Image (tube, rainbow, N blue to C red):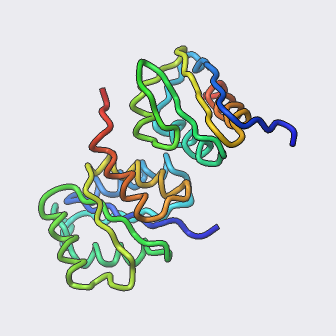
Amino acid sequence: MPSAPGIVLVSHSAKLAEGLAAMAREVCGPDVVLVAAGGGPDGTLGTDGSRVAEAIRRADQGAGVVVLADLGSAVLSVKACLADGAADEADVMLADAPLVEGAIAAAVAASIGADAAAVRRAAEEAWDVRKL
Amino acid sequence: MSGSSNGFRRRSVRIPDGVDLHARPAGLLVRVAAQQSAAITLHANGRDADATSILQVLALGATGGSEIEIEAAGGNASAALDAIAALIETLS
């Protein structure tokens, strides 16, 4: 079976990114590579472009990488990272989705054979699915 | 081909008492649904869910003891129905 698209979770908080990755793995099973990229360079709250780039490289299994980010500068860090070409060897897409719902949807989609574009669409569907 | 039945099948199943269709079993359900040749839709609480969308399945808000209607269309609808019904009825 070809490898699944990888998923990178970018948050201002390392704990949030890691906790969400653990939660998504629990739901999607072991076949999807999920990499958390949370926190600033010195372990504070923030985002770190080099950590994002490294996470993209680790998530890349040859089937593309879908990146989700929490808010504001996390989104900007990912865009800057992609614009810099820091992850040029990977086929990377930034999904425009709420982080938790998008991550779970993306991880499950990746686990059932979706390609990177379909994983991104699954994440972005989160805007359209009400909880209540 | 034993068990093959193209077309449209529908069945209601009951979620076991005390077990909700929460994230982990919903993830399992989606993975089983994705392996079927039929397209599967779930109905509960007045909502519809594409069984391959975890967010739609979770949004059903299906709780223990309640009924879920499973529809399978196309492919081997009968096998798809059996697989999803078995999964839901044995949730623990």
Which residue is at the front of the view, B55 or A103?
B55
Q: Residue furthest right?
A: B2
* Residue A26 placement, left or right of A103: right
**Residue drawn at the location 30% of the way across and 26% of the way down:** A132
Q: Quadrant of residue B89?
A: top right
Q: Quadrant of residue A9?
A: bottom left
**Residue drawn at the location 28% of the way across and 51% of the way down:** A99
**Residue A55, above or below B89:** below
Q: Residue A78, how many percent across, how many down?
A: 22, 70
**Residue A123, above or below B80:** below
Which residue is at the front of the view, B39 or B24?
B39
* Residue A50 placement, left or right of B24: left
Q: Residue A34, how many percent across, how many down?
A: 43, 62
* Residue B17 placement, left or right of A98: right
Q: Residue A123, how many percent across, how many down?
A: 35, 52
Which residue is at the front of the view, B69 or A98?
B69
Looking at the rendered image, the quarter that the N terminus of chain B falls into is top right
Looking at the rendered image, the quarter that the C terminus of chain B falls into is top right
**Residue drawn at the location 49% of the way across and 46% of the way down:** A27
- How many numbered tags mark residues here? 0
**Residue drawn at the location 27% of the way across and 84% of the way down:** A86
Q: Residue B69, how many percent across, how many down?
A: 56, 22
* Residue B86 placement, left or right of B67: right
**Residue B68, above or below A63:** above
Q: Residue furthest left?
A: A72
